[in-house]
Image (spheres, helix red, strand yellow):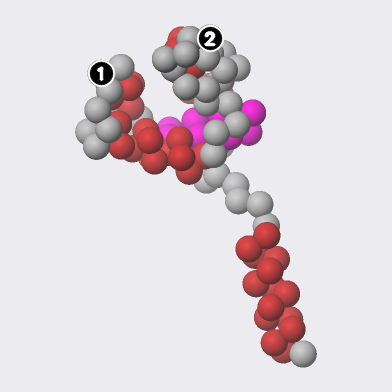
Amino acid sequence: MKKLMTAAALVAMISAPAFAAGDAEAGKAKSAACAACHGADGISTMDIYPNLAGQKAAYIVSQLKAFKAGERNNPIMAPMAMPLSDQDMEDLAAYYASM
């Protein structure tokens, strides 16, 4: 019985939806600069800029951190990511992931 309960708890943890550590409302407030290229609704109107709406939060955070650290070189995104705190990145990611 104990093994069954442990297995059930493990399945529940694995299948539970993952939520970003950020605050989507705060991310929305911080997204004005992003909208210029990525669209007000997270859907870019230009092929050279990726859509952010519906993107996984962890992916957005990892890409922003890579731009900020210089691990990913992009003359447009590097200066955009530089002033962002970790919380800013989490908030933006939560906002775009929620779309």
* Residue 33 visible within the image: no
Q: Is residue 34 magenta?
A: no
- Please provide percent x and percent y for residue 74: 27, 23
Q: Secondary structure at mark 2?
A: loop
Is residue 19 visible to us here? Answer: yes
Q: Main secondary structure of the magenta part?
A: helix
Q: Is residue 91 magenta?
A: yes
Q: Amino acid at mark 1?
A: Pro
User: Residue 91 location, x and y as percent?
Assistant: 50, 34
Front in this rendered view, residue 2 or 71:
71
| Rendering quarter of residue 98 | top right
Q: Residue furthest front?
A: 47
Task: Name the spot of residue 95 as percent of width and height, x first.
Answer: 57, 30
State whether residue 7 is above or below residue 33.
below
Q: Residue at x 46, y 40 (%)?
A: 59
Above or below for 61 versus 31: below
Query: In what quadrant of the picture does the N terminus appear?
Result: bottom right
Observer-nearest residue: 16 or 24?
A: 16
Position of residue 23 relative to residue 49, above or below, is below
The residue indicated by pointer 2 is 45
- Give the mark nearest the N terminus, 2 or 1: 2
Question: Which secondary structure, mark 1?
Answer: loop
Amino acid of disc 2: Thr
Say whether residue 37 is left or right of residue 94: left
> Dot 2 surroundings within 10 Å: few (below 14), some, or many (20 or more)?
some
Q: Residue at x 31, y 37 (%)?
A: 66
Count up the numbered dots.
2
Q: Identify the residue at horizontal 56%, vertical 13% (top origin).
A: 40
> What residue span does the magenta drawing correspond to?
87-99
Residue located beneath label 1 in the image: 75
- Which residue shows up at 33% across the image and 37% down it? 65
